Image (spheres, grey):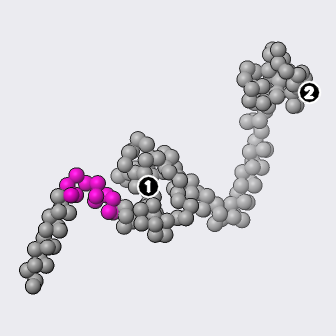
Amino acid sequence: MLLQKKCIHCGTELTEENTYEGFMRHRHYVCKDCWRKHVHEHPKNPAGHEKRAEYMKKWIKENKEHWLEIQRSYKRRNYLTINGKTVRGKKRLYPEDESCEVCKKQKRLHYHHWDNADLSKGVWVCIQCHFLIEVATKPDFEVRLKRYLELKQEIEQQSF
């Protein structure tokens, strides 16, 4: 037997027979009859949907910059382009101070990730650091860097 709870719509005392399992646990104090009525009437009420759509259109016109920032923020958090394909997934949060996580400079940031299956494995970096990371993660990077340093030293010695 349930505790002495009443339906928030009709006031009927709730029992195990007249409420759905789990409703009381999640604090949905609604009897089966009121729930069925709500479920069947709500989606079929076009006036409510039209009113909401009208309100949103008006709000977007009045708050265009804010709306665009909301969209940019959503895309920044949830989408990534990989080899020309847009992939949806959860990235790490954009840094609050809007600075590169590697050099700490405040610039336009890119998201560098290393696991296509889990976009949360990545860092927010400026374009210079992103380029450096991309190059540094190539398999022959150390060999090329070593060769460059050797060539540089040879050229400097020749000029004297």
- Mark 1, Cα crowd under 10 Å, few <14 / some 14-19 / many 20+, is many
Q: Is residue 6 visible?
A: yes
Residue drawn at 63 percent across, 66 percent down: 65
- Pick the front one: 151 or 82: 151
Q: Secondary structure at mark 2?
A: loop
Residue at (73% x, 36% y) in the render: 43
Q: Which residues are magenta?
A: 131-142
Q: Is residue 127 within the magenta segment?
A: no
Question: Is 151 positioned to the left or the right of 6 in the image?
Answer: left
Mark number, residue 52: none
Identify which amino acid the numbered label 1 is placed on: Val
Above or below, 104 relative to 28: below
- Tell me the quarter of the picture where residue 156 sits: bottom left
Left or right: 65 in relation to 119: right
Please report the residue visible at 74 percent of the width from the left and 54 percent of the height from the top.
Answer: 54
The residue that label 2 is drawn on is: 11
**Dot in front, 1 or 2:** 1
Quadrant (top left, top right, bottom left, bottom right) of the N terminus = top right
Residue 98 at x, y percent in the picture: 52, 64
Residue 124 horizontal side relative to residue 23, left or right: left
User: Which residue sits at x=28%, y=59%?
Assistant: 135
Residue 40: quadrant of the picture: top right
Q: Quick one: 98 or 29, which is closer to the camera?
A: 98
114 relative to 142 in the view: left or right: right
Q: Nearer the viewer, residue 39 or 3?
A: 3
Disc 2 marks which amino acid? Gly
Q: Is residue 137 magenta?
A: yes
Q: Is residue 86 above or below residue 96?
A: above
Name the element at disc 1: strand
User: Mark 1 or mark 2, which has the lower sequence index?
Assistant: 2
Residue bearing the label numbered 1: 123
- Alpha carbons under labels 1 and 2: distance apart: 53 Å
